[in-house]
Image: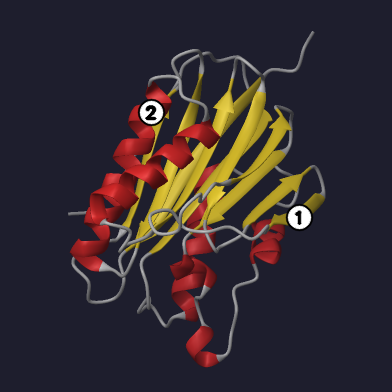
Amino acid sequence: MALQLEVQTAVAKINKYASEESGDTVEVVERPQGGISVVMADGQRSGRSAKAISNIVVRKAISLLAEGVRDGAAARATHDYLQIQRGGKVSAELTIVSIDLVTQTLVISRNARCPILLRQGEEMRWLDEASEAVGIYRNTKPTITELSVADAITIIAFTDGVWAAGYRTGEKIDLPNILQMTDPIGATNAQTIADAILAVALQLDQNRPHDDATVLVTKIMAATQADNTRRLFMRFPI
């Protein structure tokens, strides 16, 4: 009998210290022919102005993906849209993580300075090819990584509030170590991993984050029981 897999995706995020609103935006959309896409954007600067930018970017990308546009094309079109709307004067870092059930692939589209940590089985590697944010430079296109859907894959994407945590005190977050400690055998759920990473980032910034910080974790893993129910969970303090 074929191994039944499940996809878990989780987000943990927090505003910059003393900022009323996060400039990071994350949304999830179901793909029209099967699967899901998660879109994460980090708007230039922080606060309300950054939120306005990231909202523009995420809404455009989500609408294109929902219409069946492929990830790379959606990222390029989103860049063009932001450039036209804001005259090439503002930027946003854009990441799209998709599970495409038509092609049975995991697709990672990245327009961001922050790398992405990929674990396949016991092997970890960084997806860190040079990439430009959307919105400013002509002919900007994403870096694309495509993998076959398989057991034991973990993707950790994040914004620069996580990547730069601790820099003022000369410290740096060690994501491979956090992942190994939190999920040594690949059985830990995605939300626990995301929460653990954000907790370390906050600790490095003495619980006063110097930038908006978002962690996105996507896992493909063996299903613990036969269950075809899809679930979505959110916790949103107000």
Under circle 2, the secondary element is: helix
Is 100 placed above or below 158 here?
above
Q: Which mark is residue 125?
A: 1
- Report the quarter where the N terminus lies: top right
Image check: 7 left or right of 234?
right
Q: Dot 2, crowdedness within 10 Å: few (<14), some or many (≥20)?
A: some
Q: Residue at 65%, 70% (x, y): give it.
A: 174
Q: Quadrant of the C terminus?
A: bottom left
Which mark is on residue 218? none
Give the residue displayed 35% in from the left and 79% down from the top: 208
Query: Earlier along the polypeptide chain: callout 1 or callout 2?
Result: 2
Type of the residue with mark 1:
Arg
Give the CA separation, mark 1 to mark 2: 30 Å
Disc assigned to residue 64: 2
Above or below for 137 versus 167 = above
On the image, the x and y values in percent for residue 26 come to 37, 45
Q: Is residue 13 left or right of residue 125?
A: left
Instruction: Place residue 18 in its image quadrant.
Output: bottom left
Q: Nearer the viewer, residue 199 or 20?
A: 20
Residue ID at (38%, 20%): 67
Question: Residue visible at 80% across and 42% down?
Answer: 121
Residue 204 in view here: yes
Name the amino acid type tagged 2: Leu
